[in-house]
Amino acid sequence: MNLYIITGLSGAGKTNALRTFEDNNYYCIDNLPAKLLPNAIKDLDNNHIKSVAISIDSRTLNIEMLPEILEELKLLKISYKLIFLSASIEQIIKRFNESRRKHPLSKNQTSLREAIVKDQDILSLIKDDSVHIDTSNLNLTSLNIKINSLIDSKLDFHIHLSSFAYKKSIPLDNDFIFDVRELPNPFYKDEFKELTGLDKPLIEYLSKLEETKEIIHDISSFLSPRIKKYALQGRKYLAIGFGCTGGRHRSVFMTEEIANIIKNTNNDLYVSTFHREINV
């Protein structure tokens, strides 16, 4: 069975993520009580349903049992991929205020912030090797792109590289983050200002710089042995971020350059890229 389990903070986008799976012809279950997970999977498998996405979060009964149940799935040799969605407290507060919905953990004397913190505490128990997606600065289209990238991943080890703007906050879902602001900023050159790191003239300009060649060498030399190490350890997902001031020039260029190096030296890996400030 091709099984995805989606969990994370209320207000972080699990319902929208589940809709993306549904659009990809997955059999989807929302808000399944955690203790029903093993039996539900067995029943779906017996009915020859091979692509399944199940959402479990703090709305469900027995959410605190989820870590134990995930271990049970491993003992039963049930393969799955876990997606954990999060967002900053400020962003979740904004989303609940805009939707006028009540947080599932809100009680009569509990503030929205207190409910979110409690949600974080409950879900912090999950120590599984999950795919972490920070949706703080993602709109629905961007989240859809990320989920589709995961669904398209056919190989065991998925490496995801992304670019971002430091001025719009550092994403929480990266294993490694590289600051490429040491490179000259093309924004201050009139011929490059409106371009991005995906445009040929800007790529040619940055590629010729000696400091660009040095940082590409340093980053690729750092990542190469670690990628091999993680692959041998059986890791399923590695997220690598590149940041610059505006997130449209240097970080985009570097994301694509390093992704191509990884692709060319590791044919057995699935490599994807995402540009937070462009994919909106």
Image (cartoon, rainbow, N blue to C red):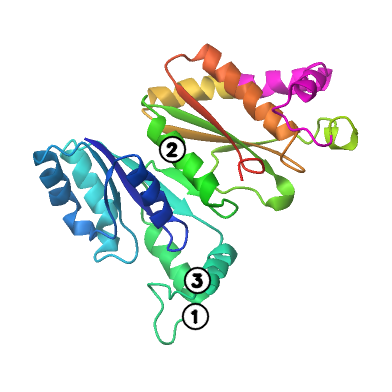
When the figure is inspected, residue 34 is found, relative to residue 96, above or below; the finding is above
In front: label 1 or label 3:
3
> Disc 2 residue type?
Asn
Q: Residue furthest bottom?
A: 109
Q: Which residues are magenta?
A: 193-222
- First in sequence, mark 1 or 3: give its number: 3
Residue at image mark 1: 111
Give the CA distance from mark 3 to mark 2.
26 Å
Image coordinates for residue 65, horizontal then vertical, percent: 25, 59
Query: Vertically, is 139 above or below 241?
Result: below
Labelled disc at residue 99: 3
Q: Magenta stretch containing residue 218, yes or no?
A: yes
Q: Is residue 246 left or right of residue 225?
A: right
* Predominant secondary structure, magenta span: helix
Tell me residue 279's x, y (percent): 61, 41
Left or right: 72, with 185 as reference point: left
